[in-house]
Amino acid sequence: MISKREKELIAEIWESLTPVAEDIGSDALLRMFASFPGTKTYFSHLDISPGSSHLRSHGKKIVLAIAEGAKDISQLTVSLAPLQTLHAYQLRIDPTNFKLFSQCILVTLACHMGEDFTPIAHAAMDKYLSAFAAVLAEKYR
């Protein structure tokens, strides 16, 4: 369960990261592709080379969706409903990939935020990203 203070912290962090959404998102995607090469199969129609416009654009979309969800975590299921449907029924993404990406986002945040990524921020963000991944995977049941 995410406490009220953790929700506030999560929202603050994501609000501060939206100006660098492309950087955070593309870095996290590159980490996922390097660590879990099988995840690249869902992006075969895009140029996912480092720095490509496709990679930066998709990374930004992901980060902005995560940031939007962080504004009101209690409404995550409602705010992610369109993404649930898209990923489950149209893109048919293996739901395990959401968890893998969450881990890559955590590492990216740690690298980007440095000392600001405190153990408290890390724990709160891990809870949030786990909830985010779980909500995206709900349509698969």
Image (cartoon, helix red, strand yellow):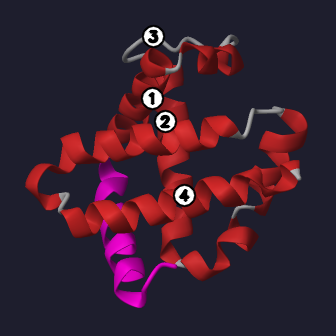
Could you tell me which residue is drawn at 72 percent across and 40 percent down?
A: 95
User: Residue 112 placed where, x, y %?
Assistant: 21, 43
User: Residue 122 placed where, x, y %?
Assistant: 29, 60
Q: Disc 1 on helix, strand or loop?
A: helix
Read off the residue under disc 2. 59
Mark 1 or mark 4, earlier in chain: 1
Callouts 1 and 2 close, C-beta under 8 Å: yes
Which amino acid type corresponds to the residue marked 2 in the rendered image? Gly
Q: CA distance from mark 2 to mark 3?
A: 12 Å
Q: Assess disc 2: are there few (<14), some (14-19) or many (≥20) residues with their C-alpha within 10 Å of its C-alpha.
A: many
Any mark on residue 49, and which?
Answer: 3
Boundaries of the magenta span = 1-20
Instruction: Please tell me whether residue 113 belongs to the stretch shown in magenta.
Output: no
Q: Disc 2 on helix, strand or loop?
A: helix
Q: CA distance from mark 1 to mark 2?
A: 5 Å
Mark 4 or mark 3, earlier in chain: 3
Read off the residue under disc 4. 130
Read off the residue under disc 1. 56
